Each structure stands twice: as C-alpha cells, then as structure tokens.
C-alpha cells in the first residue's frame, strides 16, 4: 500500500487528486547563476587556448618552424575561446 502525505493531496471538486512527486524545475534567470556556471566559464575560455598552444609547440618541435606553430596555436586558441564565449553569452541571454 502506498502512503501519501497531506502535502501531495489537493482537493478538486470534493475529490482528492494526488500531485506528482516531481519538484518543479527552477528556471535559471539572469540574476541566479550557479557556481558551476562560473567555473565552466573559466574552463571554456582557458582550455582551448592551452590546447592549441600545446599543439603549436609540438608542431614547432616536429617541423622545425619555431615561431610560426606557437603563433598559430595562440591565434586558433583565441578564436576557439571567443567562439565559446559567444556561445555562453547566447545561452545566458536566452534565460532573461
């Protein structure tokens, strides 16, 4: 036998209806950011830059093209970080 608490019962037209146990999802607004969103922002900006910089340094050492691999790594890493930043801004602006 399943027992329900009074908080899950709602009276409708002299009969009781059992409400679902699912909690209502709290919509994220512009003012309520979670700590995970802030940490994700840092990771989305730093990781592409470091990854492409690492690839550029490896290409410099393998192909013996000393400054160009690092420059291209920094360039593509910055483009990747800016792309992620635009994606994050669009996601948070839709919650407004």
Image: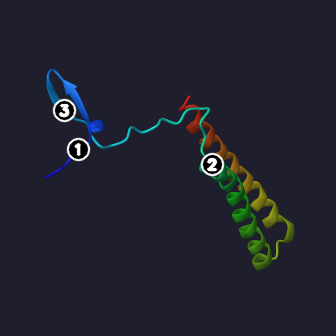
Residue, disc 3? 17
Q: Estimate the x, y position of residue 83 in percent, counting from the top left.
A: 65, 46
Crowding near pointer 3: few (<14 within 10 Å), some, many (20+)? few
Colouring chosen for the image of the structure: rainbow
Which of the two residues, 9 or 46, is positioned nearer the viewer here?
9
Residue, disc 2? 35
**For marks 1 and 3 on the same chain, the one whose residue lies earlier in the sequence:** 1
Q: Estimate the x, y position of residue 12 in percent, counting from the top left.
A: 19, 24
Point out the residue furthest to the right here.
Answer: 67
Image position of 14 (left or right of 96):
left
Does dot 2 land on a helix, a strand or a loop? Answer: helix
Q: Mark 2 and mark 3 in contact? Answer it, CB < 8 Å.
A: no
Residue, disc 1? 4
**For marks 2 and 3 on the same chain, the one whose residue lies earlier in the sequence:** 3
Of marks 2 and 3, the one in the foreground: 3
The image quarter in which residue 18 lies: top left
Of marks 2 and 1, the one in the foreground: 1
Image position of 93 (left or right of 59):
left
Does dot 3 land on a helix, a strand or a loop? Answer: strand
Q: Estimate the x, y position of residue 52 in percent, counting from the top left.
A: 71, 63
The image quarter in which residue 96 lies: top right
């Amino acid at each position: 036998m399943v027992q329900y608490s009074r908080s899950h019962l709602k009276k409708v037209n002299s009969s009781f209806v059992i409400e679902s146990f699912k909690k209502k999802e709290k919509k994220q607004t512009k003012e309520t950011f979670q700590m995970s969103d802030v940490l994700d922002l840092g990771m989305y900006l730093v990781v592409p830059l470091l990854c492409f910089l690492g690839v550029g340094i490896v290409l410099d050492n393998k192909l013996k093209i000393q400054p160009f691999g690092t420059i291209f790594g920094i360039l593509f890493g910055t483009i990747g970080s800016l792309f992620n930043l635009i994606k994050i801004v669009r996601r948070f602006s839709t919650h407004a």
